[in-house]
Amino acid sequence: MDYLLWKLLPLLALIVSFVVFFFLEDSYTANLFHMKKPPREECSFLPVCHYWISSKRIVTPQGVISGSVEINEGKIMSIVEGDSKHGKHMQQQVIDYGDAVIMPGLIDVHVHLDEPGRTEWEGFYTGTRAAAAGGVTTVVDMPLNNHPTTVSRETLKLKLEAAKKKLYVDAGFWGGLIPENALNTSILEGLLSAGVLGVKSFMCPSGIDDFPMTTIDHIKEGLPVLAKYRRRLLVHAEVQLNSGHNLELKDNDDPRVYSTYLKTRPPSWEQAAIRELVGVTEDTRTGGPLEGAHVHIVHLSDSSASLDMIKEAKHRGDSISVETCPHYLAFSSEEINDGDTRFKCSPPIRDASNREKLWEALLKGDINFLTSDHSPTLPELKLLDEGNFLKAWGGISSLQLVLPITWSYGQKHGATLEQLSLWWSKRPAEFAGLESKGAIEVGNHADIVVWQPETEFALDDKYPVFIKHPSISAYMGKKLSGQVLATFVRGNLVFKNGKHAPAACGVPILAK
Ligand SMILES: *[C@@H]1O[C@H](CO)[C@@H](O)[C@H](O)[C@H]1NC(C)=O
Ligand SMILES: [Zn+2]
């Protein structure tokens, strides 16, 4: 016996050293790259990788069907109409959602998460938890109001560092086009090759010191580089007329009255910017010198001449698109109370007839899709006590609420579930270049929201809002229809009945 033991000893030593090596190696790489994936049961309330979800209302590109969706390893494997799931798939786990709606997760391509540098305003953790709770499965983060702004390869790296282990949903990133990188191709190319999905610029002051405005000449410098990388330009399209002096204001105009603010940013500002932009988009047509570049107008408010110019440019074949936001569709200037600075944003919310024309354009497809433009700040900077519209921070917080908002206000205009998923999933996915997202289709990521459109709720103090400062949201106090029951991101059930899965397992999305 002793002899045998001695002979086996080297072998035993070898096995022990292998085990020790692998254990150390694993924790070493995990610490080095912070990349160790949490176990599935922490990422998801459903710790299996192969399962089915079924319902009487599944929104697919071919229409709303009754049936089931097979999910395996984070992807959609099959979509079966009717009750066939109860036949051959009895072995697999099936979650039956009854008549709740199964829809592609929302893709919000205009969100300000403000990290790093202004996490007291929002941040990746609170922002993406709010997204998950609202059925938003992908966000694309804006290059401001984080500090430093995302305008170079180095500052994108800071974003990615800051986002680690904090993403509850997938997140892409826009960079910023500012004079410095517009005039220095190597900085812009560095930013694009580091993986931003496109760049955003302001044609008026952004309100953030390290994000200076671009003129149409800067934009002309940047477009050839964007064409080369086939990335989009997103533009805050307002040009300050009267060199920014509020000639329209009179001494007795009260800054607590919304119409005073409205006068300082007239539709002519949007029109002036869009007129300059459609003057350069001609070259983006197929075969043109800027083919591959694309100009997108963010948060359109003016539904008159601005919209006409965009429609005309599209008609000519220019590569141009436009978004609007739920607050321009839900509210009108007439109903904003004195001092209620929660409603301040730029461009401003205009009158009810402007709003009706925005709806018309959205329903007809002249407006391509919707975004939240979730733009939070501190309650102090919203000046909720003082109520001064001219001094308060502009921006409306809505990230978690866009699905019930669009549904509640859209029903009055006859919006359908299919349209909702076009505006919030399919078209934003195409726009941002997110392959494998935006539709319940075989092969796509299993990014899914399950919700009950008929359930009404009041946005009162007791309602679980996960954004950092719910009190500044213009929607608080409203009654909405449409309750999110469950959210799946790449097959992980990340949100269920008001609760989040323990770990943040969303993935950063970088352009190649
Ligand atoms: C462009 O930026 C790079 C990187 O910051 C810098 O090294 C280079 O000198 C700049 N070029 C010009 C012409 O300013
Ligand atoms: Zn914005």
Image (tube, rainbow, N blue to C red):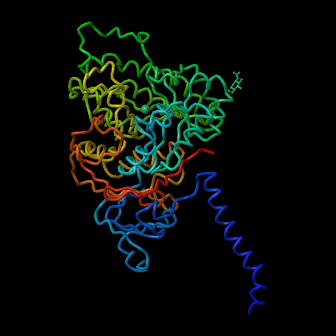
Relative to 390, residue 186 above or below: below
Residue displayed at 31% across by 55% down: 498
Horizontal relation, residue 171 to residue 382: left or right: right
Q: Is residue 31 visible?
A: yes
The mark tally for this picture is 0
Q: Nearer the viewer, residue 14 or 106?
A: 14
Q: Residue furthest front?
A: 2
Q: Nearer the viewer, residue 145 or 51?
A: 145
Residue displayed at 54% across by 28% down: 281
The C terminus - image quarter: top right
Residue displayed at 35% across by 11% down: 246
Ligand 2, what quadrant?
A: top left
Relative to 202, residue 427 above or below: below
- The picture places residue 465, in percent across and down from the top left corner, at 31, 45
Q: Residue furthest bottom?
A: 1
Relative to 12, residue 187 above or below: above
The N terminus - image quarter: bottom right
- The picture places residue 206, in percent across and down from the top left corner, at 46, 23
Horizontal relation, residue 181 to residue 272: left or right: right
Q: Is residue 315 visible?
A: no
- The picture places residue 427, in percent across and down from the top left corner, at 45, 45
- The picture places residue 64, in percent across and down from the top left corner, at 35, 59
Residue displayed at 29% across by 21% down: 389
Relative to 368, residue 22 above or below: below
Horizontal relation, residue 264 to residue 489: left or right: left
